[in-house]
Image: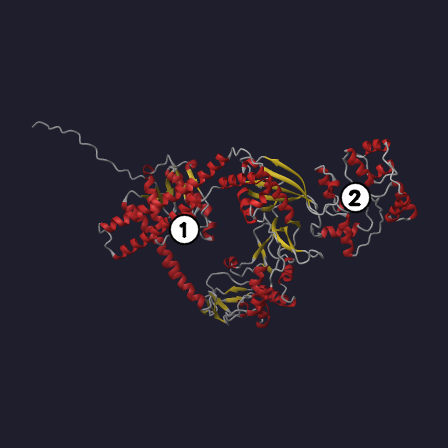
Amino acid sequence: MARKILPTPPEPERHYHSWKQELLTDLSCQVYPRVSTPEQKKNVSAEMQQDKSFAILCGWTEEMIIMDADDLGLSGQLKMEDRPAFVKMLRRIADGTIKTVIAAQVDRLFRDRWGAEYSKFMEICYTYGVKVVTPNPWRTGIEFIYDFSIPWHVDKFRRKCEEAWSYLENHVYGRMLAAQKELGERGFWTGGSIAIGYTIDRREKVDGKRNPDYRKYTIYEPHAEVVRWLFQRFRELNGRMNDLMREIERRPILFKAFDSNIDAELYTCYANTKVYAEDGETIIGYTIASTRGLGGLLSNPAYVGYWIYNNVVVSTNNHDAIVDYGVFLYAFNRLSATNLDATPNTAFLEKKQRYVKKHKADKPALLKNHIEAADEQFTIFAADVPLLGEKTKGTAVVFYGLYPRKSGVRPGSKYMIPAPDIDGFFLERFIERLQQAEGFDNFLDMEKAEQEAQLKLRQDIERDIKAAEAQMAKIEAQAEVGGLTDSDLQAKANARYIKLKEDVIRLRERLRELTGNKPESEKRLSYKQMMRAAGDCWDEVILPEEIPLMIDAFVKMVIIELLSPRFYTMTIHWKDPDWGIDGALCYRHGNPSLRWSKEEDELLEKHYPTTPKEELLQLIPGRTIFAMRHRASTKGIARLLYEPDIPTEVSWNEWQLMQEKQLTVDQIKAMRHETREKPHWTKEEDDILRKYYPVASRKDLLQAMPHRNYKNMIYRARRLGLSRNIYEEEGLSTRFSQQDTQVIEEYKLEVELLQGVQTGKLMQWSTRPRFSTELPGATRRY
């Protein structure tokens, strides 16, 4: 029989299940880490590294792996648009940058009750061909690859999301919270914070028997002793909270570290500020860092045995009291808005209402939302300060105060600058900028950048609307063909449909608002055109309430840097790139309100009696001689060294006569008026003045022209167009400190310009370009 030869059958199609072949490892992937609890955040770095290693194991190279940690600490119950890292991930999906998302578990992506968010996410991934990969618990292989073009993958992903919410709802919100509630309502500690002075008895049995105090507050005497002192001291100080807070601040440690027999797991349950040893890790004690924290302690009913759970008094005799009831009530009634029986504390509320701000400035601070200190150890607040002069009494003016950044009692300001000074200097420059704006050449570039940002946001919203509508259409299609026969399935689909419908309405409203908003560049252009047209009458065109809106449109920040008691710089970072960065040197008139430090007081006490003025200025460079005299008088320090100053109205010959005859300036002036001598300047005197006035000391000038006083020389020099190239403080620096002098010399200022100045003065403006890579505030010194 002849052999029958058949054609070779086609090789059956092989299905490769290797995950390396299913994944597009030639395109980037994104690892999405999200944790929401502090305990999870502690381990997130190690977990992210494991996720990265898993991605490399799957076949991606390190440079192809995108990791964004912006959503750490955010809840999975938030919408996708409210999670920064998720927003960026969706944009990468839409532009084709990534084709794979790696998440440790599905619940890291969503904890969504109604399913609207994860439904939109699946639809987006389906549209752009993106897969979601979850690793096994050991990160040694893949647990599952979700391909949303496969129906049962969609069902599996949805079940995982439902399980994540079910666990949250039943186990956490249901069983665990129900058990926690039962414990709390019976007076037992449920795992929250613990009042300092107490610890928790965690012994279930004592001597083989059930411990009745298990999970209850137990007095920890080393700390309880301090708590008693706080209550007693508060009463001794007649309820002056700030005074008590200052005493606490003077103690390096308020509560000592716990003994070794206290469970270390409880340490994190105390809200008090930890004090660390020099190594920065070892806890050596605790303190109270704010008046709010102190008030919370002094008004905590736990210290008299009360147990409060969910703001309801559960028991009035739950555990041993630390403080006597009467002592506690003294503090509680002064600090709590309610009584212990939950009724309103009328005495406290009436006292609170009695405090009404008596003085408010007519003009608010214009830059209060934009002004910052160059020194990051300080912050700037705008405050209304009442004026006490005879003519100004009953009125107030706004000051910008530089306050140290610290908790506890807010210390006094280091420096105070009248807001009308800074706002006035700024406004003058701002109006000048607006009115001199030309060309608007870069307007299109700025508008393009802002429009691109708005376009991205619009595309995000439109993408989410399409995804939601697609999911709604699928539910409608299932309903039409009778696919939702199960009652439970119908209920779930109905709830999801309603939520998606609400989401579409919300997103369309958001899109409408976005479309109607005018870009900031367009606002700036409108203001520029308006100001140029208005000219000097701008204040008649622009309403006062419009000025803060204009400032918001043009100003990024205004930075104040202190140079000396009398001088500071103001640096304006404009949003408009054409304007660059403007810097101003400003003079501060009046009392800067600089508090004397302990070191300055010690120097003054040691040197003021016998040290010459010039040396005093060098020893305490931030103080003028006038300030030193006033401080010395306040502290009862006498000056034992006499150094006469040559008045500016007196010539050298007259000064010699004053010394010889013990005459006063007024007597010299009277003698001068009697003679009626007003000699004209001679050519020889003019020549001497031209030669020596710019460089000679005042004393040398007076000796060179003994019949002329210094004030005469100033007036004559102005007529001749002469200026001083050296600086000598008037009256040996009764007006300026050594630091002021250094600023005057550095910026080559003419001191004569400051004579008779009764307000702040703008000394000079400078402008420099803003580089594209420069971050405002990165280099704060102008």
Q: Name the residue under label 1.
A: 76
Closer to us: 404 or 211: 404
Please say if 359 is above or below 616: below
**Label 2 CA crowd tier, 10 Å (few <14, some 14–19, many 20+):** some
Closer to us: 598 or 520: 520
Q: Position of residue 309 (x, y in %)?
A: 47, 66
Quadrant (top left/top right/bottom left/bottom right) for the N terminus: top left
Which amino acid, mark 1?
Answer: Gly
N-term-proximal mark, 2 vs 1: 1
Gap in angstroms between the C-alphas marked 2 and 1: 69 Å
Q: Name the residue under label 2.
A: 730
> Residue placed at 54% from the left, 47% from the top?
546
Q: Is residue 251 visible?
A: yes
Q: Where is residue 65 in the image (x, y as percent from the top left)?
A: 42, 38
Residue sitting at the far top: 2
Mark identifier at residue 485:
none
